Every structure is written in structure tokens, then in C-alpha cells.
Image (cartoon, helix red, strand yellow):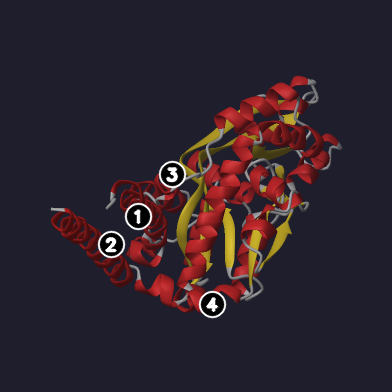
């Protein structure tokens, strides 16, 4: 009788072990290149991030707190205070292989032949820009700014392309002047000093100046798509797909740390972004960053909306619609991040059953 029980227990154990082996083999087949490329884990690479304005606050916070080094020790992080145009330039010239950059800079770069592709969303909240003038200026209506000077951070930056989009929608054509000053903070300084007539920046960057009565908001440009994405060069995607997955997963961890360390994040915003405590708290609770694969998935409809807006404004050529979406983005790597954890959890669960429930 005892021998019969032992044989049955052994049979159950073998059945579970076989099931585990089958699952592992299936995973190995389905995610083969992820594991077979593990030997590239020591591959050095460079990530370009923008430090311009409020959108990249979590990246700047993570950079200051050593989180990139913690989660991506092989990566060199290069920050650009002048915005998305500089990130695109770094990618185009081979100085970086991965970039965190805004929607408009990405699409205009692809239209110009820069070989990059979107691999994930990291900033899910739409970009909202404010057109600002000095509080003592004579401008009270957006139509009064046609033909005037605008402070912008750099060519190809989010504020620059947003101004071009706005001008196109308002029918201005090219009847305005860009004055490039290097960063959003320099844009505000140029406006306050009277060097330009107006500027256009992220609404979160200027609340202090509006509330203190130094600047006045006369127009808002709102968008209906995520503000920023993670991109990589085509060659790097082909050569190191596993690193793309690791960067996306590291981004989840960084954003989770950002939200779970609210006090640190708020102090950072107060110190480096001139936010008040209440503004920082509101920002933390309002702006959504990708902490998981659901938020990181790229929505084709949103990209099409951005593309159409830029074409209508004359920023992108009309034939840009001929560029297939498969050349602009891929969800392949985000989908891999969502597949890995549940599978590991399943195997752990089966092993736990084996350890805790099977006895002789």
C-alpha cells in the first residue's frame, strides 16, 4: 500500500516536472532571440535624453539619483538642455543609439531620412503649450503675434515644431521669426528681457511666472497624442534587440521609482524646476509616464493624428502618408516585456506547488 502511494506521488512529481520542462522549452522557442542575445549584456551604448522643460522631469530626476546606472550600467546617458532637436542630431550622427524624444521631432526626423524607429511610449500625457507675452505688452490676441518674433530653444525642438504647427493652423505661413536661445529657461529669460515678442513653452514650465504677474498666457496649443517616445536607430534595433527590451523594462522601473518616491521627486521639482510644492504635487498626480507595458504600447491612431496635424500645417510633406507605419514604429519590444514576467511567475508558481504540496 505504501509502495502504491509512493508510485502515485512519483508519477505526480514527474508529470509536473515534465509540464515545467514543456513550458520552458516553449518559452525558449517563442522568445529565443531574447535569451540567445544574452551574451550582448555587456554591450556599451549611449542614450540621449532631453533635459528641456518639464516633460523629462523623471529622466532628469533619475539621472541625478543614479537610477540609469543602477538599471542600465552599460549605458552612457547624455542629456541635452536644448531639447528634442539635439537628441535627434545625436542619433543621426551616431553619437547615441537610443533616445527619449518628442513626437514632432521624431516624425520630422523620419521625414528627413534619419534612420530611427519608435519602440515605446514613455510619456503618455499629451503636450500642452502656452503662448506667452510679457504682462506689460500690448498683445492680447494671438492674431496680433503674426509677423512677430518668438523665442525657441533649438531647431527641431518640440516648442519650435509646435510653433510651426500653430502658425500653419492659423494661416500665418512663414510670417513669424524664430529666435533660437538654447533652452526653455532661456526662452523665458529672452521674453522677460524684451528680446522677443513672445514664446511658446510647456504650460507646466511657466506657472510661477504667470501667477507672479510677469507673463501672460494668450493662447494654448493642445495635442491629442502622447508627448514623448523611446526611439532607437534602425541598425541598433537589428544588431541588439535584447538591449531595446532591457531599456524599456528599465524605464518602467525608473518611472515606478519616480512615483513611489514622491517626496524626493517633489523636492527635485522645487529645486530644479522652480515649482511650488503644490505645483509639484499636482504635476506628480497629473502627468502620466509609462510604468508598465500597457502604458508603453504605441497607438497607431495617435501617431496618425500627429502626422496629419503636421502635414496640414505644412511641417511634413504631403507624401509622408506614403511612409508605412511599420517603418515608423514597432510594438514588438514592448510586447516582449509584457510576456516575460507572467511566464516567470507561472514557472515559480508550479515549482512552489511541487515544493509545498507534493509529499511522500
Mark positioned earlier in the residue sequence (3 or 1): 3
Residue under label 1: 351
Mark positioned earlier in the residue sequence (3 or 2): 2
Residue shown at 69% from the left, 29% from the top: 280
Residue under label 2: 20
Mark positioned earlier in the residue sequence (1 or 2): 2
Mark positioned earlier in the residue sequence (1 or 4): 4
Q: Nearer the viewer, mark 3 or mark 1?
A: 1
Residue under label 4: 40
Mark 2–mark 4 CB contact (< 8 Å): no
Q: Nearer the viewer, residue 297 or 184?
A: 297
Rendering coords of residue 329 (x, y %): 40, 61
Mark positioned earlier in the residue sequence (2 or 4): 2
Rendering coords of residue 176 (x, y %): 65, 47
Q: Is residue 164 visible to us here? A: no
Q: CA distance from mark 1 to mark 2?
A: 8 Å
Q: CA distance from mark 3 to mark 2?
A: 31 Å
Q: CA distance from mark 4 to mark 3?
A: 27 Å
**Residue 164 as seen in the image, left or right of residue 210:** left
Quarter holding residue 76: bottom right
Rendering coords of residue 252 (x, y %): 53, 49
When the figure is inspected, residue 34 is found, relative to residue 228, above or below; the finding is below
Mark 4–mark 3 CB contact (< 8 Å): no
Q: Nearer the viewer, residue 165 or 325?
A: 325
Mark 1–mark 2 CB contact (< 8 Å): yes
Q: CA distance from mark 1 to mark 4?
A: 29 Å
Residue under label 3: 295
Q: Nearer the viewer, mark 2 or mark 4?
A: 2
Amino acid at each position: 500500500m505504501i509502495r502504491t502511494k509512493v508510485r502515485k506521488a512519483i508519477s505526480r512529481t514527474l508529470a509536473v516536472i515534465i509540464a515545467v520542462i514543456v513550458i520552458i522549452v516553449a518559452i525558449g522557442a517563442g522568445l529565443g532571440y531574447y535569451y540567445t542575445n544574452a551574451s550582448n549584456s555587456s554591450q556599451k551604448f549611449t542614450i540621449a535624453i532631453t533635459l528641456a522643460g518639464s516633460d523629462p522631469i523623471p529622466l532628469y530626476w533619475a539621472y541625478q539619483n543614479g537610477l540609469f546606472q543602477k538599471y542600465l550600467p552599460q549605458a552612457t546617458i547624455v542629456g541635452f538642455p536644448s531639447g528634442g532637436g539635439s537628441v535627434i542630431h545625436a542619433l543621426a550622427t551616431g553619437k547615441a543609439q537610443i533616445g527619449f524624444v518628442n513626437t514632432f521631432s521624431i516624425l520630422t526626423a523620419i521625414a528627413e531620412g534619419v534612420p530611427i524607429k519608435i519602440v515605446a511610449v514613455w510619456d503618455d500625457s499629451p503636450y500642452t503649450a502656452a503662448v506667452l507675452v510679457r504682462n506689460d505688452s500690448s498683445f492680447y490676441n494671438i492674431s496680433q503675434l503674426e509677423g512677430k518674433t518668438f523665442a525657441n530653444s533649438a531647431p527641431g525642438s518640440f516648442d519650435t515644431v509646435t510653433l510651426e504647427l500653430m502658425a500653419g493652423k492659423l494661416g500665418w505661413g512663414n510670417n513669424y521669426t524664430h529666435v533660437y536661445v538654447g533652452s526653455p529657461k532661456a526662452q523665458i529669460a529672452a521674453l522677460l528681457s524684451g528680446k522677443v515678442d513672445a514664446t511658446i513653452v510647456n504650460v507646466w514650465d511657466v506657472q510661477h511666472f504667470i501667477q507672479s504677474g510677469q507673463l501672460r498666457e494668450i493662447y494654448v496649443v493642445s495635442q491629442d497624442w502622447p508627448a514623448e517616445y523611446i526611439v532607437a536607430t534602425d541598425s541598433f534595433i537589428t544588431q541588439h534587440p535584447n538591449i531595446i527590451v532591457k531599456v524599456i523594462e528599465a524605464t518602467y522601473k525608473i518611472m515606478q521609482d519616480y512615483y513611489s518616491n514622491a517626496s524626493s521627486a517633489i523636492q527635485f521639482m522645487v529645486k530644479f524646476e522652480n515649482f511650488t510644492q503644490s505645483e509639484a504635487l499636482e504635476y506628480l498626480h497629473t502627468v502620466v509616464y509609462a510604468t508598465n507595458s500597457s502604458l508603453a504600447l504605441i497607438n497607431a491612431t495617435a501617431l496618425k493624428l500627429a502626422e496629419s496635424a503636421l502635414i496640414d500645417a505644412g511641417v511634413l510633406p504631403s507624401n509622408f502618408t506614403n511612409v508605412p507605419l511599420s517603418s515608423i514604429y514597432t510594438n514588438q519590444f514592448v510586447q516582449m516585456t509584457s510576456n516575460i514576467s507572467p511566464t516567470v511567475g507561472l514557472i515559480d508558481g508550479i515549482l512552489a506547488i511541487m515544493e509545498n504540496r507534493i509529499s511522500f
